[in-house]
Image (spheres, rainbow, N blue to C red):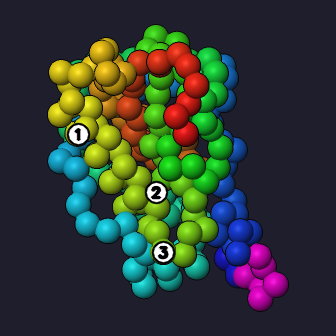
């Protein structure tokens, strides 16, 4: 894909993304997933990743950089998005209230902010997902009293042009109230 000098920064790095698949009424099938140990290191954009960002669409890059593998578990869950909590392009995690389990964080590198000069979206999403899953496991004694109940990490497959791409999500209890954000 070629760019002219007049192309804006936003247009250049966030072009050609599919429509966000997370909206009220959308349904997903997800499979339990045991994430690997928390990702270590920086999610800084190196020269190779910067050159790739210049030459490939975000969807192509997302397919080239699937999430950290971990291991798939035996549980399948069917989810339906009921309400948005924080959904939209350029978010590190998509957050929605879902039917069956109450709250879900979708870790989808395609909708991470691809405009950030200094961040590799694939490393950042892997880091964020693996750290959040590990934190909930480490703090399990506080669940339902101080922190929301953690229902686990899950994996999903999403259509991507003529193929599929993987994504991760964390299911947790929705605690009613005002966001601390």
Secondary structure beneath label 3: loop
Residue 163 appears anywhere in the view = no
Give coordinates of residue 174: x percent, y percent: 47, 19
Q: Main secondary structure of the magenta part?
A: loop
Compared across the picture, whether 33 is left or right of 78 comes to left
Q: Residue 96 at what x, y percent from top left?
A: 56, 28
Residue lying at 36% horizontally and 22% vertically, measured from the top left: 148
Judge left or right: residue 36 versus residue 105.
Answer: left
Q: Which residue is label 3 attached to?
A: 118
Callout 2 environment at 10 Å: few (<14), some (14 to 19), or many (20+)? Answer: some
Residue 6 in magenta stretch: yes
Instruction: Using the rendered image of the protein, determine whether residue 124 is visible from the camera's viewpoint.
Output: yes
Specify start and end residues of the magenta stretch as a single range: 3-8
The secondary element bearing badge 2 is classed as helix
Identify the mark nearer the N-term, 3 or 1. 3
Reading the image, the residue beneath label 2 is: 63
Q: 136 or 7, which is in the foreground?
A: 136
Sort mark 3 into few (<14), some (14-19) or many (20+) by Cα contacts within 10 Å.
Answer: few
Which comes sooner in the sequence, label 3 or label 2?
2
Secondary structure at numbered mark 1: helix
Q: Residue furthest bottom?
A: 5
| Image quadrant containing the N terminus | bottom right
Q: Quadrant of residue 64?
A: bottom left
Relative vertical location of residue 130 with respect to residue 104 in this rendering, above or below: below
Which residue carries the number 1 mark? 134
Residue 137, percent across and down? 20, 31
Contact (CB < 8 A) between labels 3 and 1?
A: no
Figure quadrant of the C terminus: top right
- Residue 123, image quadrant: bottom left
């Amino acid at each position: 894909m070629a760019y002219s000098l007049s192309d804006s920064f936003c247009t250049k790095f966030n072009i050609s993304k599919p429509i966000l698949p997370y909206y009220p009424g959308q349904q997903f099938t997800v499979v339990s997933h045991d994430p690997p140990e928390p990702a270590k290191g920086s999610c800084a954009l190196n020269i190779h990743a910067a050159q790739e960002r210049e030459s490939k669409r975000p969807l192509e890059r997302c397919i080239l950089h699937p999430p950290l593998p971990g291991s798939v578990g035996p549980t399948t869950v069917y989810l339906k998005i009921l309400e948005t909590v924080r959904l939209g392009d350029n978010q590190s995690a998509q957050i929605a209230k879902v039917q069956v389990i109450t709250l879900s964080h979708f870790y989808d590198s395609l909708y991470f902010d691809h405009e950030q000069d200094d961040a590799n979206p694939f490393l950042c999403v892997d880091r964020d997902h693996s750290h959040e899953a590990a934190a909930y496991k480490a703090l399990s004694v506080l669940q339902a009293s101080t922190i929301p109940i953690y229902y686990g990490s899950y994996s999903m497959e999403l259509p991507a042009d003529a193929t599929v791409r993987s994504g991760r999500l964390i299911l947790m209890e929705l605690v009613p109230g005002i966001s601390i954000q």
